[in-house]
Amino acid sequence: MKITSRFISSLICLSVVLLIHYTNQVFAIDGNGRSIYFSLTTSKNKEIKGYVVISDYIDIYDSINDKRESLNIIEALNGRLKLLDILKLNCSNHGRDSLLFYKDRLRYDYISTEGITSHKDYVFDYDIEYAVVFNEIKSARVISSDSVKYGFFIYNNINNTDSVWFKKKPVDTFKAGGYFCSHEIFIHVDSKEVESVLRQLDTLNKRQEEFYTKPFEEQIQYDEMYHEELKKLQGQKVVIVSGCSC
């Protein structure tokens, strides 16, 4: 698994937070999206299957009326636009002429305690990112589609071969939360190393109120303290589901 697929959400969040703080810009990265499993055919009649994650809504420019329209992806796929059109629009809106996608996906099912009541939830994780230029794509179709929450990701490195243990019910769970990112730790096999990190995280949890009144730079440092402890859990039989918002 590529390490950027674990940390990209938190890094983007902290970068955007810094940009908002120093330039007074307003951004929104929370919301829902779609994880689409697709099949495309290249100009050389080669079939490529993979996954792409896009927003539930996509902006379309109406040149006749000189205005932008926000289209729901599911409604668009049911008649107005083809998948290839949506992928091109999504990439052009981000200044790209190539489709970035993943060839493999991992799903982790868990009971989340985020919110008022506990509930069943899931999160996807992806492998190395690939790219294909749109000029080489002849057609594309949807194989399946799942709803996803933006800003949520698996923090630590796990892969499908680890399913022998992460498919089993965790023996314990632990919640840790910094200023910008929160983490649910699902412990499938306990160890002295895990217990040591949890004690440090518990100490950080108790300092939350202290950092809420600190300057912005110190609030960023508070989240970095969590990251330093969470990195120590790499290689342990735990799954860390993290969520970052700005």
Image (cartoon, rainbow, N blue to C red):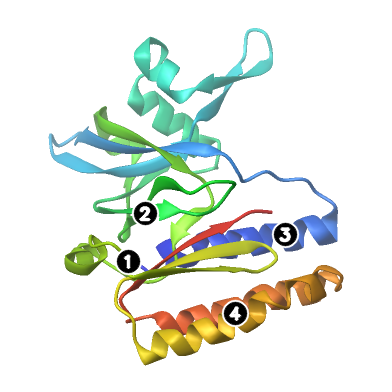
Q: Earlier in the sequence, mark 2 or mark 4?
A: 2
Mark 1 packing: few (<14 Cα in 10 Å), some, or many (20+)? Answer: some
Q: Mark 1 and mark 2: span between their CA atoms?
A: 9 Å
The residue under label 4 is: 202
User: Residue placed at 55% from the left, 36% from the top?
Assistant: 93
How far from the left and from the top, in percent, is residue 207? 73, 78
The residue under label 3 is: 17
Quadrant for residue 208, please give it: bottom right
Which of these two is toward me, 102 or 187?
A: 187
The residue under label 1 is: 170
Looking at the image, is 240 positioned above or below residue 71? below
How far from the left and from the top, in percent, is residue 227? 56, 77
Please report contact status of discs 1 and 2: CB closer than 8 Å, yes or no: yes
Q: Which mark is residue 110?
A: 2
Say which amino acid is labelled 4. Asp
Q: Earlier in the sequence, mark 4 or mark 3?
A: 3
